[in-house]
Amino acid sequence: MFNNYFNDYVGLILIPIGKLPPKFTVLDIKFHGTKNPYHYLRNFVSAMALKGIDKDISYIIFPWTFNKDVMRWYNAVDLRKVMNWDNHHREFLHQQSYNAGLPITLKDLELIKQEAKEGFSEYLAI
């Protein structure tokens, strides 16, 4: 049922090449899968650059900015496809890019609601 790499600890994690700066905190933004992934990716890369994080670490942090629905997709991706930033962001854009061309309908706007534990900035995040 599961691939063999799930049988050991190393197969369950991505191993960073570099180190995080002191007092690093995960970003307070989330990708919900309903907005333009190109805009989100640009915002993520900018935020990482401001925090002094290079792409060798960014691919480890990137999934922690996904909401639960996008995280479901990520957890199904073969880890070998996302073992570096270049592959990771390509897989992300390939999967999520359909959102960029979809028009927003009145029904879409009616369904938007802030989650109980979702902060205002996270609610408005791209």
Image (cartoon, helix red, strand yellow):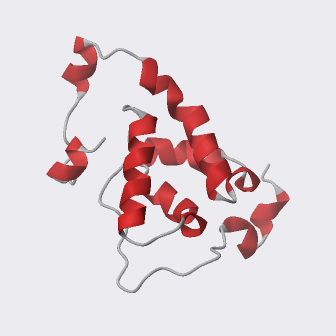
Residue 111, picture quadrant: top left
Lateral position of residue 105 relative to residue 16, left or right: left
Lateral position of residue 49 relative to residue 87, left or right: left
Lateral position of residue 39 relative to residue 58, left or right: left
Query: Does 36 sit above or below residue 52?
Result: above
Query: Does 63 sit above or below residue 39?
Result: below
- Nearest to the observer: residue 76 or residue 32: 32
Residue at 67% from the left image edge and 46% from the top image edge: 77
Residue at 35% from the left image edge and 14% from the top image edge: 103
Query: Which residue, as the protein is rendered here, is positioned at the far left?
Result: 120
Query: Which residue, as the protein is rendered here, is positioned at the far right?
Result: 4
Residue at 73% from the left image edge and 50% from the top image edge: 81
Residue 87 is situated, as x and y percent measured from the top left of the image, at 67, 49
Query: Does 19 sit above or below residue 45?
Result: below
Lateral position of residue 112 relative to residue 31, left or right: left
Residue 4, picture quadrant: bottom right
**Image label count:** 0
Residue at 35% from the left image edge and 50% from the top image edge: 30
Residue 44 is situated, as x and y percent measured from the top left of the image, at 41, 53
Residue 104 appears in view: yes
